[in-house]
Amino acid sequence: ASRVRHVRGQLLRTGLAVSADGSQIIPVTIGDNERAVAVALALQADGFDVRAIRPPSVPPGTARLRVSVNAALSDETIERFAVSLAAALKEVGLCSAGSS
């Protein structure tokens, strides 16, 4: 649970709107299918196993990333992930989650 709180805290510090439900799966809503795929691919290139979830798995216009947190993640890895995600979102023209 502490790893999940740490990831959520890092994402909030980078300006992302994330829920506080405590689940180890953190959805980051992108909205646009192509942008969600581009961000997921950028994160994968940085060594993070993050998937873009698109319709029909989610409603149209709500494409998102599926971020899974495991207990073995180090603080350094979590911080690197948050920086990588923020950079990938900026690259596709998104300032924060939920923008399209």
Image (cartoon, rainbow, N blue to C red):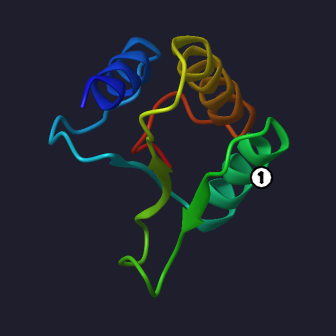
Which residue occupies 35% across, 78% down? 59
Q: Is residue 83 above or below residue 61?
A: above
Q: Secondary structure at mark 1?
A: helix
Q: Is residue 50 above or below residue 17?
A: below
On the image, the x and y values in percent for residue 74 come to: 54, 19
| Residue assigned mark 1 | 41
Q: Residue furthest bottom?
A: 56
On the image, the x and y values in percent for residue 25 come to: 36, 51
Q: Quadrant of residue 80?
A: top right
* Residue 13 appears left or right of 49: left
Q: Quadrant of residue 12?
A: top left
On the image, the x and y values in percent for residue 83 come to: 63, 18
Q: Residue furthest left?
A: 21
Q: Quadrant of residue 51?
A: bottom right
Q: Residue furthest right?
A: 45
Which residue occupies 69% across, 63% down? 34
Which residue occupies 39% across, 45% down? 98
On the image, the x and y values in percent for residue 79 come to: 56, 15
* Residue 68 appears left or right of 45: left
Which quarter of the rendered picture does the N terminus lie within?
top left
Q: Is residue 34 above or below residue 11?
A: below
